[in-house]
């Protein structure tokens, strides 16, 4: 186990590993068919979507599977959230935001092309998310999926979290734990919650258990990201590390310290798993995903 590992993972996660590679295969193939063409904007959009873990797409397909919704039906929702997430990263890396040069082991989009291309590819990825959801396959739930994604992404969700994150860099006082939790819920948690509940929405089923799972998972995910920034290896993580403290970011690690942040991540993982009790064994792939989230090295 490498020193960069966030929390020790003693057990393998065969179901999750299999489902994640399947997601990567399916979403990548669907992305190729949705973005055919050789103009630069399309090339930049494909570049932005490629190479990530596709954890959010996995959550969509897995929450769908849990409710007997086929991959065929759920796939456009999985691609939609990966487009939204990719857009958030492309903009997050811009010089006016986190000013990063490396993403997923490759130059960030504005480094590969330029800032205008990064802004525009991000914009087009965001609108593509909604285009993918405006799909007869989702029947009566189409508008719910669209409204929930708009809420998760915008002024009450991801963009608001990004705003709080940037504002915290120059805040005269360090943020309190409560303020950091709010920031991280919005910045990272909202898109993860949308992903984990999408399958239940499509199936007209109760979203509450998955919402509880995702709330804990989203925070655990961001704590792991913050810990990786401190302990991770840039080669494996695929992005620059040891940048949060330098930039004055408010993170779980900055307020709790490393050890307490790790303990908190483990508690949140346990909470996420407990929220799946109602699904019995059928929830095992999602439990494995929660354990992966806190033990990942990339
Ligand atoms: C990174 O997300 C950004 C955060 C929200 C912390 P991921 O770690 O899911 O990034 P990719 O998609 O796998 O590259
Ligand atoms: C990014 O958070 C969150 C969003 C893009 C919404 P970070 O700034 O911590 O992500 P990394 O570390 O650059 O991937
Ligand atoms: Mg950021
Ligand atoms: Mg960043
Ligand atoms: Mg980070």
Image (spheres, helix red, strand yellow):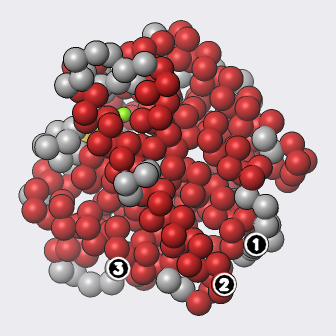
Name the residue tied to disc 2. Answer: 140
Q: What element carries label 2?
A: helix
Residue 136, horizontal then vertical, whole percent: 59, 90
Name the residue tied to disc 1. Answer: 204
Discs 3/1, front:
1
| 111 vs 264: above or below | below
**Residue at 19% over, 67% down:** 120
**Residue at 14% over, 43% down:** 96
Q: Is mark 1 on a helix, strand or loop?
A: loop
Of residues 192 and 171, the one nearer the viewer is 171
Tell me how far mark 3 sits from mark 1, CA to CA: 30 Å
| 117 vs 144: above or below | above
**Residue at 60% over, 24% down:** 265
Q: Do the residues labelled 1 and 2 touch (CB within 8 Å)?
A: yes
Pointer 3: residues within 10 angstroms few (<14), some, or many (20+)? some
Tell me how far mark 3 sits from mark 2, CA to CA: 26 Å
Name the residue tied to disc 3. Answer: 35
Q: What element carries label 3?
A: loop
Of residues 297 and 249, the one nearer the viewer is 249
Asked whether, in this view, residue 67 is left or right of residue 10, the answer is right
Residue 241, horizontal then vertical, whole percent: 30, 27
Q: Do the residues labelled 3 and 1 touch (CB within 8 Å)?
A: no
């Amino acid at each position: 186990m490498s020193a960069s590992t966030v929390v020790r993972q003693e057990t393998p996660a065969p179901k999750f590993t299999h489902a994640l590679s399947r997601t990567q295969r399916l979403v990548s193939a669907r992305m190729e068919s949705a973005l055919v063409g050789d103009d630069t904007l399309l090339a930049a959009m494909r570049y932005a979507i490629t190479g990530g873990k596709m954890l959010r797409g996995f959550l969509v397909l897995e929450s769908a599977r849990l409710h007997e919704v086929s991959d065929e039906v759920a796939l456009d929702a999985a691609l939609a959230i990966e487009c939204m997430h990719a857009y958030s990263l492309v903009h997050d890396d811009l010089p006016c935001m986190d000013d990063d040069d490396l993403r997923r082991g490759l130059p960030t989009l504005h480094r590969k092309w330029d800032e205008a291309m990064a802004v525009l590819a991000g914009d087009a990825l965001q609108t593509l998310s909604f285009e993918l959801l405006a799909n007869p396959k989702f029947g009566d739930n189409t508008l719910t999926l669209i409204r929930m994604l708009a809420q998760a992404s915008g002024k009450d969700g991801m963009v608001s979290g990004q705003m709080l994150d940037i504002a915290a860099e120059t805040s005269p006082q360090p943020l309190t734990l409560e303020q950091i939790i709010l920031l991280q819920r919005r910045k990272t948690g909202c898109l993860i919650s949308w992903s984990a509940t999408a399958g239940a929405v499509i199936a007209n089923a109760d979203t509450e258990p998955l919402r509880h799972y995702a709330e804990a998972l989203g925070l655990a995910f961001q704590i792991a990201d913050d810990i990786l920034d401190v302990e991770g290896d840039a080669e494996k993580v695929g992005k620059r590390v040891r940048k949060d403290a330098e930039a004055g970011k408010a993170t779980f690690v900055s307020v709790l310290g490393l050890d307490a942040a790790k303990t908190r991540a483990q508690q949140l993982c346990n909470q996420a798993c407990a929220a799946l009790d109602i699904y019995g064994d059928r929830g095992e792939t999602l439990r494995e995903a929660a354990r992966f989230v806190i033990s990942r090295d990339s």
